[in-house]
Each structure stands twice: as C-alpha cells, then as structure tokens.
Image (cartoon, helix red, strand yellow):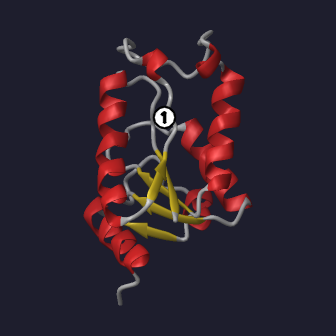
Amino acid sequence: MRVYIGGPISFKSFQEVAEYFNKYSKILSQYGFEVLHPMIAKGCLKDQNNLVPEGYQHPECTNHAIVERDNWMVAESDIVFFDFTQTTKISIGSMFELAWAYQLRKYVVVVMQPENPHWHSFVMEAADIVFPTSSEALEYLRKLIQGEL
C-alpha cells in the first residue's frame, strides 16, 4: 500500500523539510507502507536555506516538473497524509495535493488542531479523518496497514 506524505515546504530550509519527510518516511516504511513524498529526487535543492515557492531552473525542480510529479505521486498513492501541526501559514502546495487527493477519492489523513491556519471547511471536508496529534494518526495508520482492530 502506498502513502503520500504532504506538508509545507516553502520558506523552510532543505534540512528542515528533509527532516520532516525522512521522519515520517522511516516510520511509515517500518509499518509496511511504500512511501512517496515531494522531496524524493530533489537533491538539486540540498543547498537551499530558504526554499521558495517557484522559479527554480533545474529540470527536476521547474514549476511544471514539481506540479506534475507531485500530482502523479498523489494519484499513485492509496493514502495521503498531512501533518500541519507545526505550520503557521497556509501551504498552497499542500492544498493542491489535498484537492487532487479529494478529487481522486484517495483516503486522506490530516493532523492539525482547531487553531491551525489550515482549519477550514474545505480542508475538513476533504479530509477523511483528522487527528489532533501525529502519534494518534501514526497509530491509526499502523493499524490500517497491519489490519488490526
């Protein structure tokens, strides 16, 4: 079963973003998921201290390449997972990924609390399940893939 991990990237360092995706990739892989996320094969950005939302010229990171590849990864996934607990601004890229997942009828798991900037009727309706903490969401995903009660 494939899971796509989404989450805010813009205005963070490559290191911060890599830590987020690597953390969840490791956990979800150990559970038995095949993991996809938007930073796979984006080593061309490794020296960036402030990832900007557009304008890269490297073939792997042009605006078009990023949008098309992330859309493809969402389409190839069974589950789409977002953890918005550490966000202070709305992530436009994540909202596109959420909309694609909703349109494609993917199962969407979101982590956030009511004070989060993503707390919006569109996000709440597009999410199949919302957890207040990542530990609760991860335990749920573990049970899902392992077929536990």
x, y percentage for residue 37? Answer: 49, 43
SS type, badge 1: loop
Q: Amino acid at mark 1?
A: Ile
Q: Badge 1: how crowded within 10 Å, few (<14), some, or many (20+)? A: few
Is 88 situated above or below 111? Answer: above
- The answer to whether 86 appears left or right of 52 in the picture is left
- The answer to whether 21 appears left or right of 76 in the picture is left
Q: Report the residue marked by disc 1.
A: 40
Q: Quadrant of the C terminus?
A: bottom left
x, y percentage for residue 120? Answer: 54, 56
Is 49 situated above or below 21? Answer: above
Choose between 147 and 104: the one closer to the eye.
147
x, y percentage for residue 25? Answer: 36, 49
Choose between 99 and 60: the one closer to the eye.
60
For image coordinates 37% across by 78% down, the residue present is: 146
Choose between 148 and 100: the one closer to the eye.
148
